[in-house]
Image: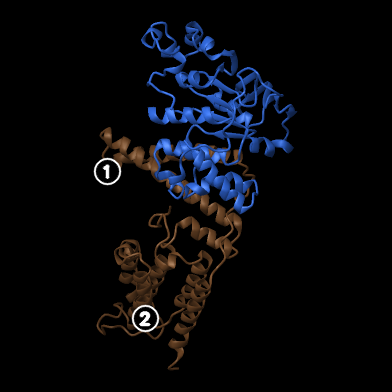
Amino acid sequence: MTSHRYLGPMPEPGQPSGPPLLEARGLGYRYPDGQVALEAISFCLAPGERLGLVGPNGAGKSTLLLLLTGVLTPSEGTLFLEGEPVTPKTLGELRRRVGVVFQHADDMLFTSRVSDDVAFGPRHSRLPASETEARINEALSAVGAEALRDRVPHHLSGGEKRRVALASALALRPEALLLDEPTSDLDPRGRRELRALLEELALATLVASHDLEFVLALCPRVLVLNHGHVVKSGPSREVLGNEALMLEHGLERPHSLTPHAEPHHPGGSAHDHDHDHETRP
Amino acid sequence: MSPGSPEERVGWLGRRDDRARLLAFFLIALAWASLTSVPGGALALACALLLAASSGLGLLHLARRLRPVLSLLCLLLLLTPFWHPPGAEPLLASWTWGPSDLGLASAGLLSLRVLALSSLAIAALDVAPFDQSLQGLRGLGVPAPLVHTALLTQRALVRFQEDLSRIEAALRVRGFRARGLGALPTYAGVAGGLLVRSVGRAERLEQAMRCRGYEGELILPAPPAASWRDGALVMGALILALAFPLAERWPA
């Protein structure tokens, strides 16, 4: 990965220096048929913080991400952006400051050229052509995808598509990134590179994933979501290491946190060893 | 991509400004569509083939792309000679309802015009990515909603095609063979499934666009400034467009 402007010092986990970048207070959402998707969701995402969001299928993770980006309007509760409530008038600012990468990268890539997809956000923010060009270069360089610039998106591999989708979110220079199942179509190397990239980014990051090893390795804090409720939040090792809690909510304790896993890695903590033997570059 | 359109610009014509390329195409197409003589049609077809050959597409590509047009023409050629406009004489005196002289001439003219226009369209449109041709149309003043709808439809069709290929493969590996009417319920299920998937895809695509600032209007990059070569292309096309009808009327 190439260094870029997003690099910077990470704040200490749990020690936010100002108001939370994003704050959900009692957020709820009902589907059009009246079914409750989310209820009374409250949490904060501090600037620079990396927060995991885990839960079984149908828990409401993707719906929550759509609420946090203003794509869906909450049925109840309020979303705050740096202490200010998000209203229809401030949706544009929310979307400029909070980037999202969808579960299926294909949903974000629809033009005939990678550079056009990356330019989509800057163009729709009405940035001048020269600035748009700079943003394309910067974002592609940030994800190490400069060589893909003129390629056709639907000819790329899953990992390449994921990089380009990430670049198209980064092109808006967001302060927070919301990632929906970021490792779903990545091979071990792709996961390792994505993790390294996300660790480099001085951005608040919310990672919704089933890949608990990835969440554990990347996020110091985690929320467990089930049936539309936050059932537990806290330090990742503590929450994800609670086997009873994990099983109760359709999850499994990460392999690296099982008691027998640690003796195999006497030189480092389980936190540093994913099941696919990821290593930090 | 539309079927047949390249991922990159091809040849000298592909490198021209999209607006100039499309304007030149429209001017010539308008003139050729109104040709009234078989020699005029033949000359137009020769010009179109020359243009296609020189554009860098290759005659093999042209032949492949013309195949569906030729199939349609075969059908027309079977029927049109039997047309008897006023003043037409049967070619065979003993067979009044047989082919007529004017019917045969019409069939020839129709074939030449269709082939010339199709070859011209292939030469003009297949030398650049389809979406860039659409952006060229926007530059020529075609209303934005039409262009945007076409751009999104193009992408949707690509995804539709990808889905269809995956479903076909999934059917084949489970022993499905398209034989007889028994396959119809399967095809109906596939069509329904594809439509449902497309709706879901379209929703997610719109959500992804909204997250990046889309508010109902696609903003396309401004076209680059046209060069003197682009102007020369349009002038050349205008001269060619005027020359054909004038040449047809010259002896009169």
Residue B106 in view, yes or no: no
Circle 1: element type:
loop
Q: Nearer the viewer, mark 1 or mark 2?
A: 2
Q: Provide residue B109's location: percent of width, then percent of height.
A: 37, 78
Q: Is residue A258 above or below residue A164?
A: above
Instruction: Tell me which residue sits at (47%, 70%) in the image.
Output: B25
Amino acid type, callout 2 = Leu
Residue drawn at 43 percent across, 82 percent down = B36
Q: Colour of chain B?
A: brown
Tally of numbered tags: 2
In the figure, the blue chain has which letter?
Answer: A
Task: From the viewer's side, name the closer residue of A255 and B119.
Answer: A255
Residue under pointer 1: B180
User: Disc 1 marks which amino acid?
Assistant: Gly
Quadrant position of the C terminus of chain A in the picture: top left
Side of B174 relative to A235 (left or right)? left
The residue indicated by pointer 2 is B43
Q: Dot 2 falls on which chain? A: B
Q: Quadrant of residue B203?
A: top right
Q: Nearer the viewer, residue B203 or A262?
A: A262
